[in-house]
Amino acid sequence: MSVAVRAGRPLVSVAMPVYNGSATVAQAVRSLLDQTYRPIEIIVVDDGSTDGTWEVLQSFGSAIRAIRQPNSGIAAARNAGLNAAQGEFIALMDSDDICEPERIAAQARFLGERPEVVLCCSDFSAFNAGGPVSNSYGEVYYSHCAASGGGVKAVYPGHGRLDISDCLVSTPGQAVVVPIHFGAVYEELALGNFVHPPTVLFRRDVLTEVGCFDPEIKIMCEWDWLVRVARVGAIGFIDRPLLRYRLSASQVSFSEDAVSDSLRVAQHICERDPTLQERQPERFRRFFGGLYSDAADARAERHPLEALSLLLTSIMQYHTVTWQTPRTVLKLLLPVPVLDLLRSLADTL
């Protein structure tokens, strides 16, 4: 697709990390090359892949900027992309997802019309190897923002509309208006992430204020960074799926390490701003109680002594007993072979 460059548009840089993504990264890159927005800079950081990812990136020639580094983790790879970016706006992207053609144009328009908003994100659809799964996956993925409570958009205090008609591949000749939501969401974001990282576009100046991703945080570095951003400015949300999110068995979002990482990040957030818990003591009591309970359940089989300490903290310090507390106790009491047998029996029923 050929897209005319419009004079005066700010450069948008897209920073994409990839590790062993040879099967998906080409599709992700092509979705960026097909954006209706220009000028755009595409930076892909190969974080020590061993599967031919680098050769796939080289096939795009000068259309992208490919950076290769030893395997250092998601935060370091994202930071390498941010440090190389030259754009006034910077977008995050993952190597197994697909951007809708209007994604960057719609988000750049949002930031252009709302100078108080420092970062915007969007809804996203989901698909797997079998095809589409959901046209709107945000409230499924971020289950603490359930549709019954108004969904993700209800978190934002401000509401408006955005005409994206000339952001689309084919101009429809009439307004295409989508709902937008925006405002101060720092305290809400500190209680759990709802900003999907690969849908993010932000102003470059944000990096001067909050810095890059923390490489000491193994998995949940995006949540930590997003809370830092929300503390310094308003966040925006476009209520339209601008990204297709790939579901696969290899994702780490809900792994044991991710659950434990969430607890560590929550502790860091409260250490940086001790008054958070003072302002909303009951919500933070339930929040931390749930995090300790989740971490105990995730670590019960492989690290029983640590899990027992986490469970006791959840119950004794935060007065939290959840639906999974009895399951965690069972994991702590029964040998792993017995647990495996019980799971096998349950699968056959």
Image: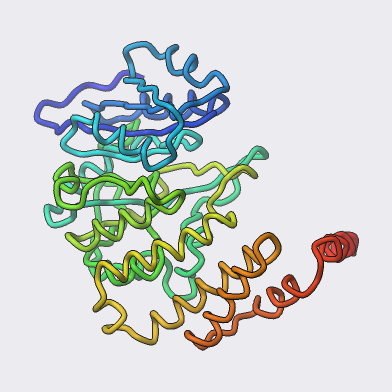
Q: Position of residue 40 (x, y in %)?
A: 25, 27
Between 304 and 174, the one lying in front of the other is 304
What is the quadrant of the N terminus in the image? top left
Left or right for 124, reference 204? right
Q: Residue at x 28, y 61 (%)?
A: 181
Left or right placement of residue 309 versus residue 223 in this view: right
Q: Residue furthest left?
A: 8
Q: Residue at x 56, y 51 (%)?
A: 134
Q: Position of residue 234 (x, y in %)?
A: 20, 60
Residue 154: name its quadrant: bottom left
Going 32% across and 12% down the picture, which residue do you hit?
62
Residue situated in front as seen by the camera: 182 or 1: 182
Location of the C terminus (image quadrant): bottom right
**Where residue 14 sits in the image (x, y, percent)?**
30, 33
Question: Image height check: is 91 above or below 214?
Answer: above
Check the image and tell me how it is coloured. rainbow
Q: Is residue 125 left or right of residue 195?
A: right
Residue 91, by quadrant, is: top left
Task: Tell me if 125 is positioned left or right of 17 in this view.
Answer: right
Classify 282 as above or below 18: below
Residue at 47% in and 58% down: 261
Residue 208 point in image, percent of width and height:
14, 46
